[in-house]
Amino acid sequence: MIKKFSYVLLIIVTAILLTACKENANAPVSSESTPSESTSNETETTTASNPDQLVIAIPADVTSLDPAITMDNTTWKIIYNAYERLVDYDGATTNIKPGVAERWEVSEDGKTWTFFLEEGHVFSDGTPVDAQAVKASFDRTLKIANGPAGVYSMVSEIRVDDPMTVTFVLSENFPPFLSTLAANYGNIVSPTVMEHEVNGDLGQAYLAENTLGSGPYKLTEWKKGDSLKLEVNEHAKVKPTLQSILFRIVGDPSVQRMQLEKGEIDIAEGIPVDQIDSIKGLENVELIQEPSLLVDYIYINTSKGNPALQDERIRQALNYAIDYESLVSAVQLGYATQMRGPIPDGIWGHDETVHQYNYDVEKAKALLAEAGAENLTLDLLYSDNKTWWETEALAIQSNLADIGVTVNLNKVAYATSREMMDKGEFDLALGVWSPDFGDPFAFMNYWFDSANHGLAGNRAFYTNREVDQLLKEAATNNDQSARQEIYKQIQDIVMEEAPYILLYQKDYILPMSKDVKGFIYNPMLEGIYFLNEMSK
Amino acid sequence: MQINLHSKSLKNNPIWYKLKQNKMTWVGLVILGLIVLLSLAAPLISPFDPNKIDLVNKFQPPSSEHWFGTDEVGRDIFTRILFGARLSLGVGILIILIAAVIGIVIGTISGYIGGIVDTVIMRFVDMILAFPNLILAMALAAVLGPNLQNAMIAIAIVKIPVYIRLARGEAMVLKEKLFVKSAESFGLNKAVIIVKHIIPNAISPVIIQATLDVGDTILLIATLGFLGLGAQPPTPEWGAMISVGWTYLLTYWWYPVFPGLFLFLASGALNLIGDGIRDVLDPKSAR
Amino acid sequence: MIKMIVKRLGLLIFVVFGVTLVTFFMSHVIPGDPASMIAGQRASEETLQSIRQQLGLDKPVWIQYFHYIGDLLTGDLGTSIRTQRPVLDELITFFPATLELAIAAFAIAIVLGIPLGVLAALKKNTFWDNLSRVFSISGVSIPVFFSGLIVILIFYGNLGWFPSNGRISLDINPPTHITGFYILDSIFTGDMVALKSSLEHIFLPALVLSYAQLAVITRQVRASMLEVMSQEYIRTAVANGIKGRLLIISYALKNALIPTVTVIGVAFGSLLGGAVVTETIFGWPGMGKFVVDSISYLDFPAMMGFTIIISIGYVLINLIVDIIYGLLNPQMKQ
């Protein structure tokens, strides 16, 4: 028995030895003999050196690809180009241009929107895009009732007027409605998705792994945990230059950098800002730097946290205690700008006259003394969701220590932090926000309306009846200049009452190969590529 | 470690002389001793505060002022490594102590009492042992929430079953021994027998296992730290330092490399010591 | 023997049941709401409610558990919250990659570990013994995440000998799916291009992973070699004039390897654990990455599926090891 076994073992070991030797032998040989090296190198580099193919390294795999489900920015960048929308953002601006709809009309009360569709748009399975398809797609989103449906909660009815005309009836006036249609949740899905329905799931299982739209590309391959491939949708009306797009999942930033340097990838999405400077030295790489609408700020829990925070003077003191300039340079290496008011630069309603807190330790101490706060200790909640929060939390801790406030850092898992924010279980918390549509509503109404306490947006649990009233007025008025005036008024109040510490508006930074042409950055669609405009 | 070796059960043992001959064990002891000394003397050696933020001086390369450079918020890495040594070694030993104590108590009870109690306990032990160490520790740490204390609890839970098994095995042998039988015949309470007779005699294999486990434990804490489930900054724990620092490897190599080096040295030293001890004792415990 | 197998399989059922119970209730104690992860950055209470309802999260925990076990008995592991795919499909996608990596690493550990152990035993307490000791113990003492990165830096970054990421080059189609192991599949289908590429891709991660397990094998081989060599029949063989290193090795190694089998189970479990971290660094599309993502998303059906598979796999491997050991060593049967 023992003999038999040792024979088996011997064979196994020899087999392994042989393969191992082969692997070992391969390595040095391929480095010495030129022909074998060049072949092995070719197989590695053709992916990005192919002028018809764009290779983008993303840091993590994506979730469900169903436009009615996903609220994940990384997933959006994959599927956005596989679908079309009624309207689109115009280039780099927040202006709206026709998409599938060649023109549209809106009733005076803002509740009825009619879209006239352009002929000739076809889904990737050959089905034409018509009013019925548009209705079916939006009805499906509403029926699935996930995140994207939340955006369209005011849609009460979708009507097909004739084969190429569709009307949306809203339950209330919602001025930003048009720009929601240009975002990813406005993607129109082919009605044939219902052929793939399993157990009444409205095709969710199918669309989780496939695309079925009229955009210039379609998903042709998804190697889970490894890569996703988009190829040209031959039915599409728009004909792009790049024949295929490869999204490659590379988790490690150092590896991404090496791949970019070697030309194996064209775009590296996962390189943190504090390593960007080292990219600047690479001669085949350029750095895209654009102002973004992503803001980074601190929620001060005004009602459920430490009772001291209910005092406006203490909240102001905290605002004065932050060394904004050093923070921006330490945390974002200067690739950011201190915020002025809750509405970032780039969205109408941003106002240069709104009060901005500056770094003033004496004033902060005086305010604390006036409020009678001594030995104040606060918890600062944050998670690993943003790589820079670690440094940011440490900097804030040190800033507040200078005015005599002790800060305990409370770092938790991302999912846990979401729950704690929703329930208000924190004193201070780090957060980021980016708008879903190009309207001040996306900041003001979510952050300050007391109806939105918790995850819905008002994470300071701030309540001011006057502000609530003004917000409501601003949301239901169709006159932009009147709305701007109201929003200015609200900004003055909330800057005074300081339910948040507004830190900075981040820049969008993207290392990209110099070969890539036609990249357009739209702040409303951060991280999404207009692939049909791009070439190599 | 050294304290264990000097304890009375081992001192006048031929094993002790055997151990003396094993050079690599001594290399391990010297390295570990140096690290312990350095960490104890940290405040004397370094003028810096391990947690003082100095944003102006961030990412300074190694120099005569900052021997191992500075990190992303300008803290001196050398100082943090020294203070981290206290933490990493202390926590490693503490976890094993907790696991060993709990393991001995449960294991001896299980082995001595036997019957249904033993069966239930052993099924639980089997269940825990049905998982790879790291994965179970990861899952537990994730459930309990990511911080050092919870990581310690998670690792202790993972380690306990090994000690239960060891102590139980010893207890089952001891149970049949004459002195235990005679104690029973005097009508001594079971708890008293366990405390007075079983535990003291079952303890030495547990101590040996414990010395073997410390190196592994330090690595586990660091790995949990790397996965974001262990010690949280600004705690100067080595794993947490590497976890933050390793993304900077290409740009600021000193940040992950020095804590990594110390983690390697400490864990290597402990493993060498453990290996030496096992070597000496192995023929006895071999199958 | 059969009694032992039946007993172990009985244990397996107990383990799986216990594991589901513990994991399920633990994953529901975690503060955090999967619905809030799906719903997007700002989520109204209505949206959250509707998602919870669809996922069945609005029901009491024990009812959820009851449903889960009911489905499990019919072989349904549920649907992943994060990816919306059946968990079983996810596991079938990711498990072979992890297993392939672990087996390759194990093979390397054996190939390097046995000679090192033999060398150390033959040259006991010499420079070579110490060298072998330091080399193998270094492996256990370096965290995988650290050695992984350094290896990438050297062999990919500087030398360019090996690729950095993934299982196979992106230009090359993976071999036809037979076992899910790229190396085996490409041998079966005779696809030499795929074979070369998969070998190149697996080499670095397997090397790093194996180094961490090397000591277990080396030390065990050394110890049992020493023990065997001190035994009567080897001494007799030497006394009877059978000399030469080769003979000693073949006599002694044959017997020394038997106890080594017992550490295989332990080592393999650690390999699976280490694979989780190795995969993260080498972008290896296996279960490790999938699980880490699932944990951060509170995707408990995925977490449960993973723990069930791992515990079954682990118990089975230990069972196989014990069977082999029992067959090799008839005295063991009491």
Image (cartoon, grey):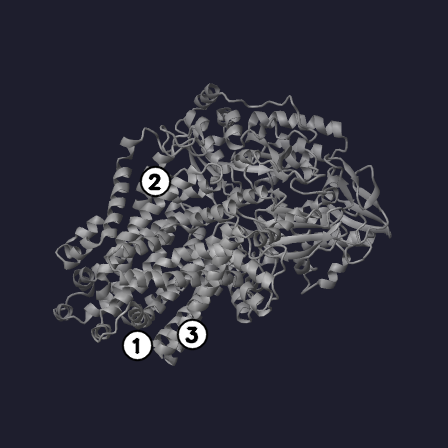
Image coordinates for residue B61, horizontal then vertical, percent: 42, 32
Question: Considering only vertical position in the picture, is C196 above or below A272?
Answer: below
In this figure, which residue is indicated by the disc labeled 1?
Answer: C332
The kind of residue on which mark 3 rests is Leu
In this figure, which residue is indicated by the disc labeled 2?
Answer: B84
Q: Chain of mark 2?
A: B
| Marks 1 and 3, how far apart at CA | 20 Å
Count of numbered badges drawn on the protein: 3
Image coordinates for residue A375, horizontal then vertical, percent: 39, 28
Q: Chain of mark 3?
A: C
Q: Give the image quarter of residue B140.
A: bottom left
**Residues at marks 3 and 2, common chain?**
no
Image coordinates for residue A368, horizontal then vertical, percent: 45, 24
Residue B112 visible somewhere in the drawing: no
Q: Residue at x 70, y 63 (%)?
A: A197
Q: Chain of mark 1?
A: C
| Marks 2 and 1, how far apart at CA | 47 Å
The kind of residue on which mark 2 rests is Gly
Query: Looking at this rendering, what residue extends furthest in the right direction?
Result: A162
Q: Residue at x 40, y 59 (%)?
A: C270
In this figure, which residue is indicated by the disc labeled 3?
Answer: C9
Dot 1 lies on which element? helix
Front in this rendered view, residue A10 or A509: A10
State which mark lies toward you, 3 or 2: 2
Question: Considering only vertical position in the picture, is B183 above or below A74?
Answer: below
Whether the residues at callouts 1 and 3 have beta carbons within 8 Å, the answer is no
Q: Quadrant of the N terminus of chain C?
A: bottom left
The kind of residue on which mark 1 rests is Met
Front in this rendered view, residue A72 or A69: A72
* Disc 3: CA contacts within 10 A as few (<14), some (14-19) or many (>=20): some
